[in-house]
Amino acid sequence: MLVDKVEGNTLRTRLVMVGAFAGAILALSLTVAFSWGDGVLGGGRVEESSEAKTAFRSAEGNCVFWAQPDVSDIHLVPCDQPHLYEVTGVVNIGDKYAPGAPFPSVEEWRNIALERCTNDTDKYLGKQLDPYGRFTVSALRPGNSEWATGDREMRCVLQWAAPGGALQPIKGKVADQNQSAVWDTGTCLALAGKTVGNPIDCAQPHAYEIVATVDLTKQFKGGYPNQKDQSTWLDTECNNDVQAYAGGIDLGAQKLILTWDTREQESWDAGSTLVNCMVGAKLPDDSGLQAITGSIKQAAQDAPPQGGQPPAEGGQPTTQPGG
């Protein structure tokens, strides 16, 4: 969960972190709710630069970026450049919070953002927002001092957050992009407890390695295919793709599993037909995932010829106890 360590005038406290992230893990599909990691809020006060003030006053259609952990460098950027937020609208909540009203708690801010920002997102995009897709709503809120002087304007935004909560750079307007919750082939996702975290180097312990992206419309030309039919087809498709990605790999010998996403009806209706095939490892008691270290692609490259001897310094992926 998001840990609210400081409720002050830090720039990070101006970011309202909301949203739920769902994905398929373990064999076939297992829905998991992902939540924000610890340490989202900073410590001491950071004075807002003129660029930061402009960003917090940005208009609909603007895009915002920052690189520093304390958000001190927040600024507007052209939307065709990497950015973290796309502003979808400006909402005044003065109808419910009159002058002198107490400053809302972080949980209240999340509820306000979900209530006031979600409904108008489809109108801004000109199409349906995939409720299970890559992009989620969030907000920029007024700070304590602004609130005390009567500021009730909140900027609704769209963001792309990894399962562990790390914001991912977006390039281009969301309306022009496929909303499917997929990752580039070769991406590894960290292990967070027994489930999935943020992108990480595959040499580090991780939960999954993405081996392919598949378009369900390759097989299903008509209406929405139920998840059982999706999985039946993906069982063959992903097995073919993992061999194309890392030919010669014996997943069973490495105690690895091949799994994939499936799509909900709402995602299909929003045009999200892409899914990922991925390799992971289950804990012995099937209670979650365990860590893998190393890429299966490297493992296949390092595998000896049939009848040969294994290399002295093998690159085989290894599984580690988790839990």
Image (cartoon, grey):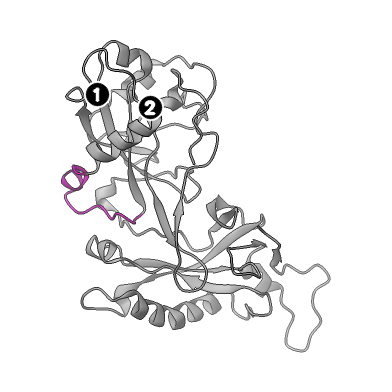
The label on residue 254 is none
Q: Amino acid at mark 1?
A: Glu
Q: Quadrant of residue 55?
A: top left
Question: Does residue 77 appear in this view?
Answer: no
**Marks 2 and 1: which is nearer the front?**
2
User: Which element carries disc 2, helix, strand or loop?
Assistant: loop
Q: Is residue 95 magenta?
A: no
Question: Which residue in the structure is indicated by mark 1?
Answer: 153
Which residue appears at 47% of the width and 51% of the height? Answer: 163
Magenta segment: 119-133
Q: Position of residue 136 (x, y in %)?
A: 33, 46
Q: Position of residue 146 (x, y in %)?
A: 32, 14
User: Is residue 3 shown above or below 189?
Assistant: above
Q: Quadrant of residue 209?
A: bottom right
Q: In the image as oriented, which residue stretches furthest toward the bottom?
A: 307
Question: Does residue 272 appear in this view?
Answer: yes
Circle 1: is it few (<14), some (14-19), or many (20+) Cα within 10 Å? Answer: some
Which residue appears at 63% of the width and 65% of the height? Answer: 295
Which residue appears at 59% of the width and 63% of the height? Answer: 289
The label on residue 105 is 2
User: Where the C terminus falls, by quadrant?
Assistant: bottom right
User: Is residue 25 shown above or below 65?
Assistant: below
Q: Amino acid at mark 2?
A: Ser
